[in-house]
Image: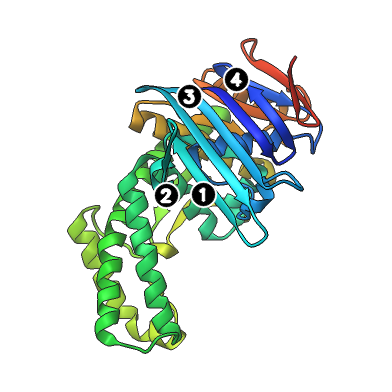
Amino acid sequence: MQLTSVRLSSFRNYAELNLEPAAGLNVFVGANAQGKSNLLEAIAMLGTGKSFRTSRDSDLVSDGLELAVVSGDAQIRAGIIHLGCSIAKTVRSTRKQYTVNGQGVRYARFLGSIRVVTFVPADLQLVGGPPSLRRALINIALAQEDRQYYHELARYQKALQQKSAMLRGNVSFDPELLAIYDNALVDAGTYVMLTRNHFISELAREAERTHGEWTHGAETLRVSYAPNVPFEAPTGDAVSGAFERRLKAVAEQERARKMALAGPHRDDLALELDGHSLAAYGSQGQQRTAVLALKVAEYSVMRDRANEAPLLLLDDVLSELDQERAAAFLAGVGGYEQAFVTATHLPPGLPASARVYGIERATVSLC
């Protein structure tokens, strides 16, 4: 897959932009606060329909204006696809609209029309941050490639909200209704857990291999699925049976604590380096290398599953990497179908085939 054009109008600090990126490695160099991250944010929205930096859509519209538009064209296996996302801001609310090939679509249809993998500095929190960040990585990757996963996760979250409201006392307690919610959690949650288990096993294999290449085998990364509901075998019956037993076991505790205590909403991704917790014992450089290996692995798994490469978007990826690791990383991504990297300075070891742009005050120019 290749993004052949991206167009911005009143998006963040971009009044207008029409860019035709090259295949392979595209590098955007400029000082801070010039628009590098904003550009990658816009490109990512063509795949996920959401910002990777803010949950407030109004932040995406240029100051003093009411409408921002992000659109682009991509060459995918099926042909050319035209994508658009508009953000309309009013005093009371902000609304987004999506189009695919000129036709208005709902978010679920837009999501994953093209696939993207992103790295931003905040992703370093994947190591030491809360489990919700690691679950988000898994959910974003799977929702782009598997529409059923997106729908089953949404169904699970709806049942979880309903059950949680009852446990908190927002609605009258009803044992029969609670049983209905638990059945819905088991039904949707079983699919979610099985899909996560399969994906993480592939992710782990790729991340561990990539990390080993970068460190020349001097360090060993281990990635594994840490489900809140352990199961003996990755089968529907085994997972649903384990989930049902777990819900019965914690039922009284849930009522006492007024919260749902069992299920994939409490899953985690375990990261270890040389047999020890990466969060507790890894240096900042080791953590950054591990997160990058996870992102490259995410790219590889998504590419192999769909038989089509996603876009790789890497914001400020090279800071705090030593020169040897940075050069090894650039050599690797330089061979990808299309990658976008931002940096404050031209990085050493840049492949000769890379296309380099300068960004200054939201103006993009070829170097």
- Position of residue 187 measured from the top left corner of the image (x, y, whole percent): 25, 63
Give the quadrant of residue 203: top left
The amino acid on which the numbered mark 4 sits, given as a three-letter code, is Pro
Q: Which of marks 3 and 2 is nearer the N terminus?
A: 3
233 relative position to 39: left or right = left
The amino acid on which the numbered mark 1 sits, given as a three-letter code, is Glu
Mark 2: few, some, or many residues within 10 Å (few <14, many ≥20)? some
Q: Earlier in the sequence, mark 1 or mark 2?
A: 2
Mark 4: few, some, or many residues within 10 Å (few <14, many ≥20)? some
The amino acid on which the numbered mark 2 sits, given as a three-letter code, is Ser
- Position of residue 270 measured from the top left corner of the image (x, y, whole percent): 47, 53
In whole angstroms, how far apart are the C-alphas of marks 2 and 4? 36 Å
Q: Name the residue under label 1.
A: 272
In whole angstroms, how far apart are the C-alphas of marks 1 and 2? 9 Å
Q: Name the residue under label 3.
A: 74
Residue lying at 49% horizontally and 48% vertically, measured from the top left: 137
Q: Name the residue under label 4.
A: 21
In whole angstroms, how far apart are the C-alphas of marks 1 and 4? 37 Å
